[in-house]
Image: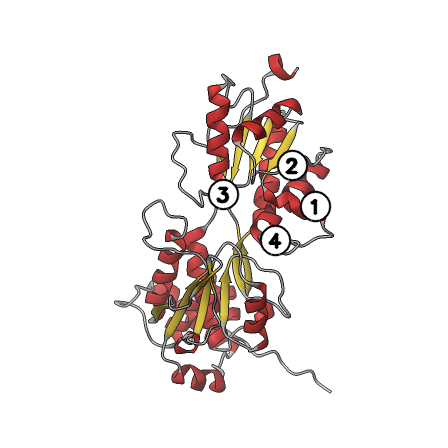
Amino acid sequence: MTAARKRITQQDIARMTGVSQATVSLVLNGRGDADVRIAPETRERVLAAIRSTGYVADPIARRLADRHNRILGVFTYEPVFPAGSGDFYQPFLLGIEESAEQLGCDLLLLTSAPVTDGRRRIFHEDNRLRLADGCILLGRSLDRDELTRLVAEGQAFVSVGRRDDAGGPVPHVGADYVTATAAVVARAVAAGHRELCYLGDGGETSRSSGGTGGSVPESFADRFAGYREAAARHGLAPRWEKASGRTPAEVLDALVADGVTAVLVEEFADGVALAAVARERGLDLPGDLSMLALGDPTRPAPTDIDFSGYRIPRREMGRQATEVLTALIAGEVSRSDARRLLPCEPVAGVTLTAPNTRRNG
């Protein structure tokens, strides 16, 4: 008996032609040019792939799409407005807005949910989640019970940021912190450092058998996993210091006492505070202590220091989260396939150099 041929999807066409699924959708729907300025050569490349594969839009998905009202919800567990130029969430929102505009969708910011214990909850007696065709979730950490319910009820949603399974695959578009952090460790080792330390709460995951232990956000757990794996690869002991509940002076005392020459900082603001104390004590940065920032500021942290490390692709994460959500709504992708990790951008900065041999030799 001949095996059934796998149905070609818009995602397959996008992969073949090197464009986004949203672009394929726009070409199929006859939009573009004045609307979103799809280049003629790009349009022809997509159409040629459609002709060569014999792609036919799923009639059921098309009928469902016709009944949708093209409204995408955005739910934030933490406040995101006013979104100033330095606000952590602004690039995510810009990416979401740009992609929604290209797709011809409106955005509905879901703010009616009451705040309980300092956080919003999606499910409450007056929730308006179903006014939207699907929802994008923003937040450092998401409520596990609510994620489990969203999965169980078959809701169309996408998390900005990688999430562990919650009774099933959780669709997400996140940053590849594991690879980016491992690369930072490699840079420090190449500069001559052997006494490295991770500063942040991600190290709490080392006390459990894996995962986040229920209290550490996946983004922190992934950073520490990248550090731990790279440390083992380079023959280093995976040291870490907890940041929360301690003053920068206490943290610096611990690092100096342990002979640390380079510290990987989970939270940008903690790095700024630590650098300020180190300067007050007359330490040379980065000669006496190199510092590597694992991402962008999540809270205000004014500084004149150009930290080495990496940046999070926040705008692109917002764009692709919107694309993934619309693909889920249209039935073009399954939940298990609706998970993406994007590379982070390395930052050379000025806070990484060879260790000061006069102090550490």
Residue 295 has which mark?
A: 3
Tag 1 and tag 2, C-beta contact below 8 Å: yes
Classify mark 3: helix, strand or loop: loop
- Which is nearer the eye, 188 or 45? 188
Q: Nearer the viewer, mark 2 or mark 3?
A: 2
Tag 1: amino acid: Ser
- Specify few, some or many for label 1: CA neighbours under 10 Å numbering under 14, 14-19, or 20 or more: some
Q: Earlier in the sequence, mark 2 or mark 3?
A: 2
Residue 134's mark? none
Task: Give the foreground label among 4 and 1.
Answer: 4
- Mark 1 or mark 2: which comes first in sequence? 1
Q: Which residue is mark 2?
A: 240
**Nearest the eye: 140 or 70:** 140
Do tag 4 and tag 2 residues touch (Cβ < 8 Å)?
no
Residue 116, placed above or below residue 177: below
301 sits left or right of 193 in the view: left
Q: Which residue is mark 4?
A: 215
Which residue is disc 1 drawn over? Answer: 206
Relative to the observer, which residue lies in front, 79 or 219? 79
Give amino acid for label 4: Ser
Label 3 vs 4, first from the N-terminus: 4
